Image (cartoon, rainbow, N blue to C red):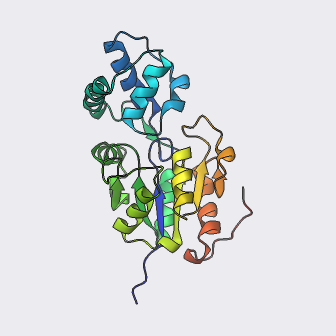
Amino acid sequence: MTVLPPIAVFDLDGTLAETAGDLVGTLNVILAREGHAPLPLEQARDLLGAGARALIQRGFSASGAELSPERLEVLFEAFLEHYGAHLTDNSYLFPGVVAALDRLEAEGFVLAVCTNKVEAHAVALLAELGVRDRFPVIVGKDTFAFSKPDPRHITATIARAGGDPTRAVMVGDSRADVAAAQAGGIPVVGVTFGYTPVPMRELKPDWVIEHFDELVDAVAALVPDAFRGVEVKPAA
C-alpha cells in the first residue's frame, strides 16, 4: 500500500509574502488611467485576497466609480500586464517563512501553493522571491474551473501534489482560505498579518498564528501523526 506524504498548502498574498505594495500600486495605476485618485495602501490592503478582477471591482467601488463588465475585462488585462512587470518592486517574504518551510520539509511534508492570483504570476513571484523550487505544485485562480472559497481549489491542489488529504493543512490569511478549507474538511491555520477586513480570530480557523515562528507548532497540533519529536503546545 502506497503511503502518501503529509502536505501543507499555503495561500500566497498576505500569507507567504507581503505583496500589498505591488498589488495596490498596480490598482492605483489602473485607477489613474481612468481618471480616479489613488487609494492609500492601508485602506486598500483589505480589498486584496480574491484575485485581480475582484481587486479592480473593489477598488473602483471604493472610489465611488461604476465599472461595466466589459470595461472590467479590459482593465483586468491591463492590470495583469502592468503587475507582471512589477511583481517584486515592494514585495517580500514574511519573516520566518523560509525556516518554517525548512522544518516542514524535514518532517516529510510536501509543500504547495493554492492562491487566487493567476498561476503564471504566482510562479514568477515565488521564483523572484527565491522559493519557487520549494513548491512542487503551484495552483492559481485560473488553474482549475473553480477557486477559493470553493473547497475543490484546495482539495484539487492536494491531489495534484500527491499529498495525503487526511494529513493535510491549509495556511491562509482570508475568509476565502478559511471557508474553503473548512468546507473541504481540511484543518486551517490563520495568520493575523494578512489581508482581511475581519480579524482572523473572528473567522474561527483551527489555529491562529501571529508569526511564522509559530507555524510548526500549529501544524504539529493539527497533523500530529506526521511529526516526530515535536512537542504539541496548547491552541493559540
- Report the number of numbered marks: 0
Instruction: Classify the position of the C terminus by image quarter.
Output: bottom right
Q: Is residue 1 left or right of residue 176?
A: left
Query: Vertical placement of 13 versus 39: above or below?
Result: below
Q: Where 194 falls versus 145 (above or below)?
A: above
Tell me residue 187's x, y (percent). Answer: 58, 62
Residue drawn at (28%, 26%) of the image = 70
Residue 174 seen anywhere in this rendered image of the structure? no
Quadrant location, the N terminus: bottom left
**Residue 19: x and y, percent?**
44, 36
Judge from the rendering whether residue 191 lies leftward or rightward of residue 72; answer left or right. Answer: right
| Residue 160 in the image, given as x and y percentages of width and height | 34, 66
Does 54 appear above or below 15?
above
Residue situated in front as seen by the camera: 149 or 9: 149
Q: State the image quarter where residue 67 is shown.
A: top left
Relative side of 193 to 75, left or right: right
Q: Nearer the viewer, residue 27 or 107?
A: 27
Report the residue at 28% width, 33% height from top.
80
Q: What residue is drawn where x is 34% and y is 46%?
A: 122
Q: Is residue 189 left or right of residue 99?
A: right
Q: Is residue 44 visible to the viewer in this orientation of the structure?
A: yes
Could you tell me residue 207's position as x and y percent? Answer: 65, 56
Extreme-right residue of the structure: 234
